Image (tube, rainbow, N blue to C red):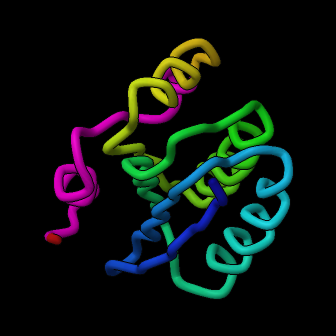
Amino acid sequence: MSFSVEFDKKQNVLLVRMSGELDHHSSEQLKTKWKEQLHNQDIKHVVINLEMLSFMDSSGLGVILGRYKEVKQIGGEMVVCSISPAVQRLFELAGMFKIIRLEENEKYALMSLGVAS
């Protein structure tokens, strides 16, 4: 299965919807596109919707961690939502939930950042 990403902007929140398999092949492409989105728009927070993501390896975690650091530098927050059990386990093992909040779905994630969906 291939990887795809869709970016959407709601007020000052960048929505990142990933689907498929995020591995070392697709991580570099994601990193480039995501950085462009962060720097070319007035973005403060990021919501990552992983509902359709079936697989992620450590390189995918690295891309997310890199963007997390950029968002933190501008005083923003990163929220993950709609995560599959397999990807959630990877996040837990890597300790990602110590720094990135998990919400049930995109609507709650946006509301928690003060944006009505």
Q: Nearer the viewer, residue 99 or 50?
A: 50
> Along the horizontal axis of the image, is 26 left or right of 96?
right
Is 42 situated above or below 4?
below
Q: Residue at x 56, y 53 (%)?
A: 20
Q: Nearer the viewer, residue 46 or 17?
A: 17
> Along the horizontal axis of the image, is 99 left or right of 39?
left
Question: Residue 60, percent across and down?
Answer: 71, 43
Residue 107 in magenta stretch: yes
The number of discs equals: 0
Image: magenta residue range: 96-116
Question: Residue 51, percent across and down?
Answer: 37, 48
Is 99 situated above or below 15?
above
> Along the horizontal axis of the image, is 31 left or right of 93?
right
Is 68 situated above or below 45?
above
Q: Residue at x 76, y 31 (%)?
A: 58
Name the image quarter holding the C terminus: bottom left
User: Residue 83: which quarter of the image?
Assistant: top left
User: Residue 74: which quarter of the image?
Assistant: bottom right
> Along the horizontal axis of the image, is 98 left or right of 114?
right
Q: Nearer the viewer, residue 2 or 11?
A: 2
Is 76 situated above or below 93?
below
Query: For the view shown, which residue lies furthest in the bottom direction?
Result: 40
Query: For the view shown, which residue lies furthest in the front direction?
Result: 1
Q: Residue at x 77, y 62 (%)?
A: 31
Residue 55 in magenta stretch: no
Question: Residue 116, percent across and down?
Answer: 14, 70
Question: Residue 64, percent across and down?
Answer: 65, 46
Q: Residue at x 50, y 47 (%)?
A: 53
Q: Nearer the viewer, residue 48 or 2?
A: 2
